[in-house]
Image (spheres, rainbow, N blue to C red):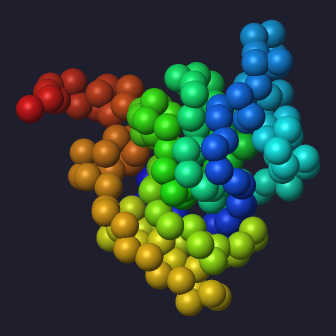
Amino acid sequence: MTTVICGRARVLGADINTDVNCSSKYMPGKDAAFVATCAFEQIAPGFAQAFKKGDVIVAGKHFGINSSREQAVHVMRLMGVSGIVAVSFGRQFFRNAINNGLPVIECDIDGIADKDAIEVDLAAGRVSVAARGIVRSVPPLPPEIQAILAASGLIPFLQKHPDWKLV
């Protein structure tokens, strides 16, 4: 995985819980690929159909709140989400995203519009939208988290580094 993500911003609102993209009305019984075709339908009809592989979800505060449902991340991976930039995240969702290799960055999203070209530099800690003159500094992700993301998630990371230990 590269430390720079370039894609199209797909803007959602605030307080989006994981039931919105991974609705319990579809789980269990349907596979994640089917659920990915219906993701975010309750708040943005047609969102999943208009979403292109490599797009970046941009959202307000509390993205992914109220659930520890790991399938929510799997659904977004199947949609082709390359990363998520949000004002804040539900803590369980944040960790599930990292564990499953989906980059997440907390950042002020003011001025970012739907379909803007957005660049997220995970190592440098920068989110930018050149067309709008937006350049925001954010804390860079720690090297350990970047390594997990580069390995496509925690399990692949641990498989590559069987002797790795928490310090």
Residue found 50% across the figure and 67% down from its top:
108
Residue found 33% across the figure and 34% down from its top:
157
Which of 87 and 138 lies nearest the eye of the viewer?
Answer: 87
Residue found 53% across the figure and 83% down from its top:
134
**Could you tell me residue 99's position as x and y percent?**
42, 33
Outermost residue to the right: 46
Q: Is residue 54 left or right of residue 6?
A: right
Q: Is residue 76 left or right of residue 52?
A: left
**Could you tell me residue 97's position as x and y percent?**
49, 38
**Could you tell me residue 123's position as x and y percent?**
33, 64
Q: Is residue 10 left or right of residue 84?
A: right
Res. 138 visible in picture: yes
Q: Quadrant of residue 29?
A: top right
Rendered view: 37 above or below 147: above
Res. 33 visible in picture: no
Which of 89 and 76 lies nearest the eye of the viewer?
Answer: 89
Residue found 71% across the figure and 28% down from its top:
19
Number of numbered discs visible in the structure rendering: 0
Q: Quadrant of residue 52?
A: bottom right
Image quadrant holding the C terminus, namely top left
